[in-house]
């Protein structure tokens, strides 16, 4: 997590400086509820409820089912600041696989609006909506990923390995519960017009996909032993303090594999611009990083 970061983003007005009453009341509500939460963060379910309350009535009917499906997939009890960019990307891929590109684009647009609301209201620091993208050639991307994974081990921190193991156990529990739901729904009538059955089957498919993905990662996982690292050089698993030279701001990151990255928790991927630039560099080195704001220069102060 950054040792120094900017103030949490407040709800932004539109480009003309105007904001509707619904936007203002919705942003205020989500901030108020966040302050009342024990650890300062809303759960996904709570954020969903706040978002729906500020929506126009004519938009709720179409939006609610898609966002509810997204919330169930991640688990409604999750705090919104625990969601990782990699999970958002995975949801995109699953939705693309189950429908045409045009249909997936429409479905994801609804979820993207929800994630954008969380960022604009100041509930999260990162705009997770940017990770909801329809893959134009998912088959090619999947094949390339499978080849890459088969050729290398997956290096995880001890905390990352434990988190994945815990998540896998939870997913197996969800799968068992969904099996029961499917059996009950199938017994309720005509399966051709059985919405609960279709919903349960869809949820089961997504849960099984996540189970296969995590199991595949854990089979190839090698847990990083931080005690054996050379702390003069940045490695995967290193906790690195860097300084942005132009602003003198300091940031603290842990460098991890892409499947463990979580920018909201200060874990950045070795495939990210900053991660790729500092990986393998020595303490004291200065690196240049291309960002949307232009080229930025950083100095590596510490690695542990």
Image: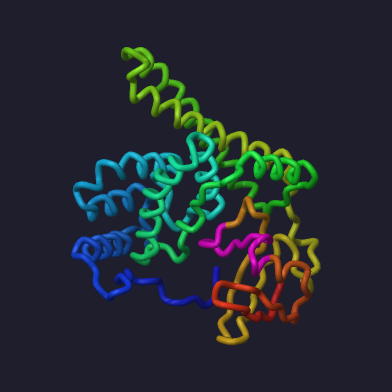
Where residue 1 sits in the image (x, y, percent)?
55, 68
Q: Which residue is drawn at 74% across and 67% down?
A: 279
Vertical relation: 42 (above or below) 235: above
Q: Quadrant of the C terminus?
A: bottom right
Toward the front, the furthest residue is 102
Q: Is 91 placed left or right of 14 in the picture?
A: right
| Vertical arrangement, residue 191 with respect to residue 19, above or below | above
Residue at 66%, 74% (x, y): give it.
289
Could you tell me residue 105's position as x and y percent? 44, 46
Query: Can you see residue 122?
Result: yes
Which quadrant holds residue 120? bottom left
x, y percent for residue 199: 39, 29
Please state the extent of the stretch shown in magenta in the rendering.
Answer: 262-275
Q: Is residue 304 visible?
A: no
**Relative height, residue 180 to residue 265 (above, below):** above
- Looking at the image, which is closer to me, 245 or 112? 112
Relative to 176, 59 lies left or right:
left
Q: Is residue 167 magenta?
A: no
Q: Is residue 264 above or below residue 182?
A: below
Q: Nearer the viewer, residue 10 or 18?
A: 18
Task: Answer left or right for 239 relative to 169.
Answer: right
Scheme of colours in the image: rainbow
Q: In terms of image quadrants, where is residue 280?
A: bottom right
Q: Residue at x 73, y 48 (%)?
A: 154
> Which residue is at a point 48% across and 35% down the rendered structure image?
99
Given residues 244 and 165, the one toward you in this image is: 244
Residue 118: x %, y % from top left:
37, 59
Looking at the image, how many numbered discs can be counted on the residues? 0
């Amino acid at each position: 997590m950054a040792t120094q970061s900017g103030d949490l983003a407040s709800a932004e007005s539109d480009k003309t400086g105007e904001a509707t009453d619904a936007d203002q009341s919705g942003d205020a509500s989500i901030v108020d509820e966040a302050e009342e939460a024990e650890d300062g963060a809303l759960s996904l379910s709570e954020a969903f409820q706040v978002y729906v309350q500020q929506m126009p009535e004519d938009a709720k009917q179409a939006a609610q089912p898609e966002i509810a499906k997204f919330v169930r997939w991640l688990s409604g009890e999750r705090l919104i600041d625990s969601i990782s960019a990699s999970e958002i990307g995975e949801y995109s891929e699953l939705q693309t696989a189950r429908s045409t590109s045009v249909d997936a684009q429409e479905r994801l647009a609804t979820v993207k609006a929800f994630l954008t609301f969380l960022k604009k209201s100041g509930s999260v620091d990162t705009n997770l909506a940017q990770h909801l993208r329809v893959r134009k050639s998912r088959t090619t991307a999947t094949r390339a990923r499978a080849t890459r994974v088969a050729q290398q081990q997956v290096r995880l921190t001890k905390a990352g390995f434990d988190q994945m193991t815990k998540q896998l156990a939870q997913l197996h529990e969800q799968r068992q519960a969904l099996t029961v739901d499917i059996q009950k729904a199938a017994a309720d009538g005509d399966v051709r017009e059985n919405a609960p059955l279709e919903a349960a089957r869809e949820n089961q498919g997504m849960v099984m996909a996540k189970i296969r993905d995590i199991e595949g990662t854990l089979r190839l996982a090698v847990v990083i032993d931080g005690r054996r690292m050379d702390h003069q050089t940045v490695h995967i698993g290193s906790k690195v303090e860097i300084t942005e030279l132009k602003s003198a701001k300091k940031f603290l990151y842990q460098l991890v594999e892409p499947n463990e990255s979580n920018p909201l928790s200060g874990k950045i991927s070795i495939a990210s611009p900053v991660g790729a630039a500092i990986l393998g560099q020595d303490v004291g080195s200065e690196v240049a990083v291309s960002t949307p704001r232009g080229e930025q220069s950083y100095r590596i102060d510490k690695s542990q």
